[in-house]
Image: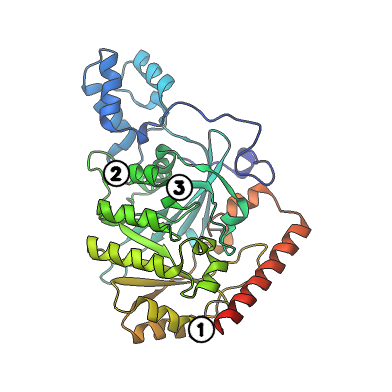
Amino acid sequence: MPGVTEAQMPDAPSGSTSPTAGPVRDPRPGLSGLEPDVLSAWFADRSQPGYRARQIADAVWAGGSGGAQAGAEVRTLPAALRDEVDAAFRFDTLTATDVRPGDGGQTEKALHRLSDGALVESVLMHYPARGANRQRDTVCISSQAGCAVGCPFCATGELGFSRDLETAEIVDQVRAAARRLTASGRRLTNVVFMGMGEPLLNLDRVLEAVTALSDPHRFGLGARHITVSTSGVVPGIRRLTALGPQFTLAVSLHAARDPLRDVLVPLNRRWPVAEVVAAARDHAEVTGRRISYEVTLIDGVNDTPADAAAMADLLRGDLCHVNLIPMNPVAHTPWRASPMDRIEGFAARLRQDRIAVTIRRNRGQEIGAACGQLAAERAGEPAAPVVARRRELLVRDSAAALRAVGG
């Protein structure tokens, strides 16, 4: 999908990703979210030959290159039938997209508007071939508009929760990225559900999206090239384990000690960290797939030697890999990223216990590529007293958590 400029994309109302009065969500289902038999039945009900459903599917998926955005592009259908399909379905559920390049073109942040005015984000990251590693093009997508988890270092948490995304609204973020890649002669290699929202709180739609993306007759991306992240929804992890998927499960860990994780990941108050890791451990044992643990490191908060030792104790012997990520700067928080020498020391402590570790470098800071930053920017600045109170509470709560664990 071609990007539109900021001026072309109307602003969202202040303080919300979805207006309380304004556009109504388009009731037409998105074609990319339909199971093939549903589309076949629709054509059969209209006495149309079976191959018409295949023509639509070919137009929507286009061999993983993103596909058509409107019925007018499907020249294999008679004009009257194209109009009928357009009246019943949407070829694209993203009504507008603002794309911002960064990192010398290696990162592209996209802000998508949905039919009801809700804003969601995706990030397309390009990784050139190096040594034995082939070129990769990865898109990070959203599963909800806003987020109810409220992690204080995440810009999405400032927006609050608006709604779950429909299956097609999830998949169409991937199709939009695939179209941009196709235009430059590249193909999408990886999808990660690490954008706005908690995927396991919209699990049915996320699983439908993963099925569509990994289906060789639809988008055609192998399941092992898909990662689904969670901040620790234990029932969702257990449900995934029973299904035995082949995509990668990632857990946003951030701290191994409950008092501190209660502050950084409020969901920890419902499912404590030991319970989360136990569920992830069982998942790895059943599926044979290692767990990816994401740890955002914050200067003086969760990057101490005691934190590293606690994490090593928690994960020792598990089939897992830890990604250490310097915190992206987020407005209205008092925190900043850990210095690299402290991150490297944290990694070294985990490696002492033979835990695989990668230190990630931040991408797209100049374009607000951290989760939720563009949507928060478009929603408007909160009032100064609200910002001051938020900072005060974060400082107080994190200091209390550090005292509680002897940090």
Residue in the foreground of this view, choosing between 174 and 6 = 174
- Specify the label residue 342 is tagged with: 1
User: Mark 3 belongs to which amino acid?
Assistant: Ser
Q: Quadrant of residue 52?
A: top left
Few, some or many residues within 10 Å of mark 3 (<14, 14–19, 20+): many
**173 and 233: which is toward the camera:** 233
Identify the residue at horizontal 31%, vertical 45% (top origin). Answer: 213
Q: Are marks 3 and 1 in contact (CB under 8 Å)?
A: no
Residue at horizontal 39 percent and vertical 77 percent from the top: 314
- Choose the circle earlier in sequence order: 2 or 3: 3
Left or right of residue 161, residue 58 in this image: left
* Residue 394, percent from left and from top: 65, 68
Q: Residue sitting at 46 percent across and 35 percent down?
A: 93
Separation (CA) of disc 1 from disc 2 = 40 Å
| Label 2: element kind | helix
x, y percent for residue 220:
26, 45
